[in-house]
Image: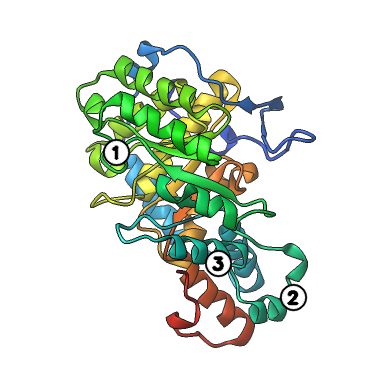
């Protein structure tokens, strides 16, 4: 991923390369240069493409710094962006002390993410704002499915030996199948990071392709664990391999690494998505997870998606936040917009 426009990089600071914002009639997927994009089916692995990837790290870091410095929205426009952020959330609980009751409370929060009085004050009753998905361990898939009946909120399950991804391959595949059978509509899978460190791209491709087959009709989000991958070049290469193997989304992190979603990683992954769309005619979604806790950060990520990929990637079909504490701060910001006062954290419990 060099900064040369003619290379397969996407690391070209040129907004004209971004997809346009039109939507195919009856489909959530965008068009690219007037060409309708399809859902990702994957392609045979192209080792030359992977080998040719280069990243200008200093250029990416400068781009991330300028993005934060010059991107802001205020007043009613800020409130609108924050409401959009809520609709793109995978509201998540992945703690060792999770219980069925906690998951049910989380689902209730996903169904009604903003308290009734604030919804009325903002005049947004007709929007029926809800989160995109509830993300849980396999043990709680059925609990979440029952609690979300009658809504459009999807049930997502982390799988494949989350968060390390080091259990035997057969067990990881079986885990996916069990979650799908229990009702999970989305599966967040973890790659074997050692394949990336060793440059074993064929093995990584085969692993993800096997996960994809086990997912069946469920959407597959491939967690790269970017904080563990050491270099942006590794992130770029792993992103491309995951998309070649059929990922519906590529996701930054498990949320358990020391370093999780960062804007430089976001630029690398979104431009890989853009390049893949240009090369294959297929659209892949993006999920930023881990360390995104403030309303300001959510707007920075939404702005990144708009600039790099276009408006369709600001919707839940192609963009997600992996969130646990983020919703709390967004609610507080919305209350400030409505009343001029910040509320206490305890007034907006999640689970």
Query: Residue tagged by mark 1?
Result: 57
Query: Residue tagged by mark 2?
Result: 123
Q: Position of residue 116 (x, y in %)?
A: 66, 77
2 or 1: mark nearer the eye: 2
Crowding at mark 2 (Cα within 10 Å: few <14, some 14-19, many 20+):
few
Label 2 or label 1, whichever comes before in sequence order: 1
Viewer can see residue 11: no
3 or 1: mark nearer the eye: 3
Q: Is residue 121 left or right of residue 253?
A: right
**Which residue is painted at 50% across and 27% down in the image?**
275
Specify the quadrant that holds the N terminus: top left
Q: Marks 3 and 1, how far apart in space?
A: 40 Å
Query: Residue tagged by mark 3?
Result: 109
Q: Position of residue 192 (x, y in %)?
A: 27, 30
Q: Marks 2 and 1, how far apart in space?
A: 45 Å
Which secondary structure lies at badge 3?
Answer: helix
Label 2 or label 3, whichever comes before in sequence order: 3
Q: Position of residue 141 (x, y in %)?
A: 48, 48
Specify the quadrant that holds the C terminus: bottom left
Nearest the camera: 64 or 245?
245
**Which residue is painted at 25% across and 18% down in the image?**
200
């Amino acid at each position: 991923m060099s900064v040369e426009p003619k290379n397969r990089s996407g690391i070209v600071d040129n907004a004209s390369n971004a997809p346009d914002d039109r939507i195919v009639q009856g489909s959530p997927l965008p068009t690219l240069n007037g060409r309708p994009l399809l859902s990702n089916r994957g392609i045979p692995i192209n080792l030359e493409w992977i080998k040719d990837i280069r990243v200008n790290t200093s250029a990416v870091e400068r781009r991330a710094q300028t993005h934060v410095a010059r991107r802001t929205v205020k007043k009613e426009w800020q409130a609108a962006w924050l409401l959009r952020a809520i609709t793109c959330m995978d509201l998540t609980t992945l703690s060792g002390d999770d219980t069925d009751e906690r998951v049910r409370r989380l689902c209730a929060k996903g169904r009604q993410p903003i308290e009734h009085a604030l919804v009325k004050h903002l005049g947004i009753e007709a929007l029926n704002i809800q989160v995109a998905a509830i993300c849980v361990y396999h043990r709680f898939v059925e609990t979440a499915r029952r609690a979300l009946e009658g809504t459009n909120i999807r049930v997502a399950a982390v799988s494949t030996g989350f968060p390390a991804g080091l259990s035997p391959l057969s067990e990881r595949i079986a885990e996916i199948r069990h979650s799908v059978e229990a009702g999970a509509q989305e599966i967040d899978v973890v790659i074997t990071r050692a394949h990336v460190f060793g440059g074993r791209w064929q093995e990584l491709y085969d692993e993800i392709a096997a996960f994809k087959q086990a997912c069946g009709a469920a959407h597959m989000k491939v967690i790269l664990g970017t904080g563990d991958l050491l270099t942006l070049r590794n992130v770029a290469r792993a992103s491309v391999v995951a998309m070649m193997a059929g990922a519906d989304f590529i996701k930054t992190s498990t949320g358990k690494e020391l370093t999780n979603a960062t804007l430089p990683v976001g630029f690398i992954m979104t431009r890989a998505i853009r390049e893949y769309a240009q090369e294959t005619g297929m659209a892949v979604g993006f999920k930023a997870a881990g360390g995104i806790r403030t309303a300001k950060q959510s707007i920075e990520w939404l702005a990144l998606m708009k600039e790099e990929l276009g408006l369709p990637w600001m919707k839940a079909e192609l963009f997600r936040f992996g969130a646990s504490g983020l919703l709390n701060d967004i609610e507080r910001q919305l209350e400030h917009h409505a009343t001029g006062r910040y509320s206490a954290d305890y007034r907006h419990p999640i689970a």
